[in-house]
Amino acid sequence: MFGKKEPPKFEHYIRSGQKLLRCGYTTGTCAALGAAGAARLLFTGKAPETVGLRTPKGIVVEVAPIYCEKIDTGAVCAIRKDGGDDIDVTDGLPVIANVTLLPNEHGVVKIDGGKGVGRVTKPGLDQPVGAAAINHVPREMITEALLKEAKTFEYKGGFSVLVSIEGGEEAAKKTFNPHIGVIGGLSVLGTSGIVEPMSQQAIVDTMQLEIHQAALKNGARRLILTPGNYGLDYLRETNLTLLDIPIIKCSNFIGDALDAAATEHFEEVLLVGHIGKLVKVAGGIMNTHSRMADCRTELFCTYAALAGAKKEVCEALMQAATTDACLDILDQNGLREPVMHGLINAVQLHLERRAAGAFQVGAVLFSNQTGPLGQTETAEKLLQKWKES
């Protein structure tokens, strides 16, 4: 009660349905704020109570540093990462900027990563191999923040900045970083400077990056997409992992994955997935998250009705809890083959519409309970071609 008063949180909100969700700010914003705070201490001899900047999104962030102090080589300033209502592994971690003045290097800002910031080991990322995983927008923000401080205090020299993240090395093990080729720590990220809660953009960005990296090393221009771990297990069980074709997990973002494959000029794409996900594609749904749409039973019911199912069968399908339960109902009524035929043709139709002629695309559907359920005609041709080559 009588201790040090906790500084106010960043207050910027967006509406999601009937809720107001608090935004946060990125690790890139933290690094730029820390750099500005350290520079101000060097110029004034006094640690700032707060430090602020205008993010690329146009929103001003002003926060109190965790600490800001002089060291032998310059000054360090730590800013606590605040994810708002979008909590991730970086939330609450101190992002520390260690700033050294370079009096004889006018306008120069040298930026590198220290402990807790990863290093790039694979091509295709925002930064070249060997560089600290501090993306270009955070680098621009750090540079702008420091040059603004220099102008304010009429300093004509340059700066050297070492960005580190306390706890970053351990936190990075819970991220995609080791998979995409960022080793030893977290990435310093952010394009807008602001974290919008419930945003799925980070997942999409990672997937698009993996597809880009696959394109760089895949001369045959072939790609396999699967929504998740069930698909990966199926690919292993059917030896499709032995084809030496890149396999990318696309989560629920099937449409975004197909768009990325077109952007990267792939020529042949195979989508392999559990019926629970891919049946939605038969309805033209390209984001298969249940929040977006869930018409699984409706699609089974529709194609069962087209195959001559009685009303009570359609009612049972509509009440089924899972797609495997739908398959059981179809099996009991001798309808699996015609229904799956209709669904698979619809999946092919919607995949081709999304691909818009950019590449050949097919799909393989399976169930954990009953195994393979079928594949589109294009999928059959692609698999035969791949296995023969």
Image (cartoon, grey):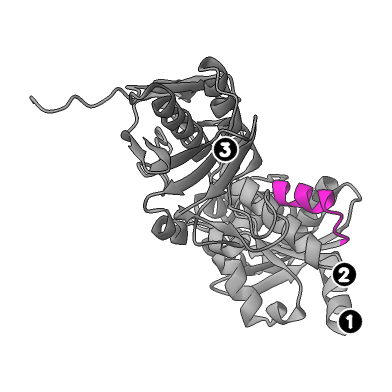
The kind of residue on which mark 1 rests is Ser
Q: CA–CA distance between discs 2 and 1?
A: 10 Å
Camera-nearest residue between 85 and 360: 85
Dot 2 falls on a residue whose secondary structure is loop
The kind of residue on which mark 3 rests is Gly
**Residue annotated with mark 1:** 389
Badge 1 crowding class, 10 Å Cα cut-off, few under 14, some 14 to 19, many 20 or more, is: few
Q: Position of residue 171 (x, y in %)?
A: 41, 56
Give the magenta part as a residue range: 255-267
Q: Residue at x 19, y 24 (%)?
A: 5
Q: Position of residue 23 (x, y in %)?
A: 45, 28
Camera-nearest residue between 21 and 339: 21
- Asked whether residue 264 is drawn in magenta, I would say yes
Q: Position of residue 53 (x, y in %)?
A: 50, 22
Camera-nearest residue between 378 and 1: 1
**Residue annotated with mark 2:** 220
Residues at badges 2 and 3 in contact (C-beta under 8 Å)?
no
Which of the marked residues, 1 or 3, is nearer the chain's N terminus? 3
The kind of residue on which mark 2 rests is Ala
